[in-house]
Image: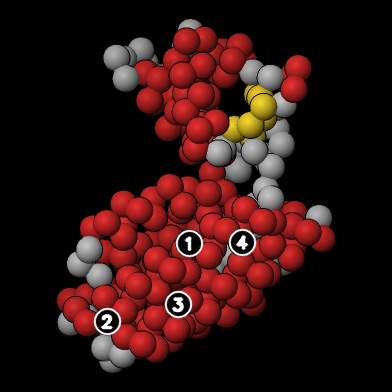
């Protein structure tokens, strides 16, 4: 991580840099952090670091670690289920709305995202896989025509990115995820709102069950499940 140049919005920039490090897994679940260490890492004073950490605590990414300060929030199976429950509801409503608006340009964009996803699977690059996965679901929100889907889901997807990044996904399982994405897109293009909603809900619910089970088994990054 590079040092940050001092600016009036420095606390916000420190927050964003820390959040990205947490979501990308560079700061692992349960890893302890200190104001002094982070200040030295970013080349800033402790004050913007303190402000950033306070905000991250409110957002659920940082928790107290007793006398040892704070740490990156551990991944909790119940939290995973709760997040995916919200995601399933949002995705389902957005998919139904998107199906009613699906036309040639949107369909072509969805197909391009499918191709990008397949290329990500072939690459085996975890960051690329996660980015392609998120892009596909954001496409559904945007295609719905209701900007509040994207705004409402933003905080949830930051947590979901972290969960997805903590679980190793093999090519076979992620190929299955993109087959599910393809079926969802086909329903959208066919303007079948009920089927699109059912498929996207099942997609999220299945991912939640597998990820939560993985965490309960304590397999963490050794799991070979797809996050979807």
- The furthest residue to the top: 45
Q: Is residue 107 visible?
A: no
Q: Disc number at residue 200? A: 3
Sequence-wise first label, 2 or 3: 2
Q: Residue at x 67, y 48 (%)?
A: 75
For disc 2, the marked residue is 99
For disc 1, the marked residue is 86
Question: Where on the picture, by quarter, is residue 24?
Answer: top right
Sequence-wise first label, 4 or 1: 4
Q: Secondary structure at mark 3?
A: helix
Looking at the rendered image, the disc whose residue lies closer to the viewer, 3 or 1, is 1
Is 64 drawn above or below residue 207 in the view shown?
above
Way the structure is coloured = secondary structure
Task: Specify few, some or many for label 4: CA neighbours under 10 Å numbering under 14, 14-19, or 20 or more.
Answer: many
Q: Disc number at residue 81? A: 4
Label 3 – label 1 distance at C-alpha: 12 Å
Label 2 – label 4 distance at C-alpha: 26 Å
């Amino acid at each position: 991580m590079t040092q940050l140049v001092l600016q009036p919005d420095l606390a916000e920039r420190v927050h964003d840099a820390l959040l990205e490090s947490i979501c990308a897994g560079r700061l692992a679940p349960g890893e302890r952090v200190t104001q002094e260490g982070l200040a030295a890492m970013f080349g800033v004073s402790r004050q913007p670091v303190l402000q950033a950490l306070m905000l991250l605590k409110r957002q659920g990414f940082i928790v107290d670690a007793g006398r040892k300060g704070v740490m990156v929030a551990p991944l909790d199976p119940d939290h995973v289920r709760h997040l995916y429950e919200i995601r399933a509801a949002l995705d389902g409503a957005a998919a139904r709305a998107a199906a009613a608006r699906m036309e040639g340009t949107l369909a072509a964009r969805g197909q391009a995202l499918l191709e990008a996803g397949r290329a990500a699977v072939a690459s085996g690059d975890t960051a690329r896989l996660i980015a392609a996965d998120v892009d596909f679901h954001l496409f559904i929100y945007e295609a719905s025509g209701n900007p509040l889907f994207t705004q409402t889901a933003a905080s949830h997807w930051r947590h979901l990115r972290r969960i997805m990044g903590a679980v190793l996904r093999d090519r076979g399982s992620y190929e299955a995820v993109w087959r599910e994405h393809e079926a969802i897109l086909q329903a959208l293009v066919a303007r079948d709102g009920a089927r699109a909603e059912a498929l996207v809900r099942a997609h999220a619910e299945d991912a939640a069950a597998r990820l939560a089970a993985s965490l309960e088994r304590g397999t963490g990054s050794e799991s070979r499940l797809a996050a979807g």
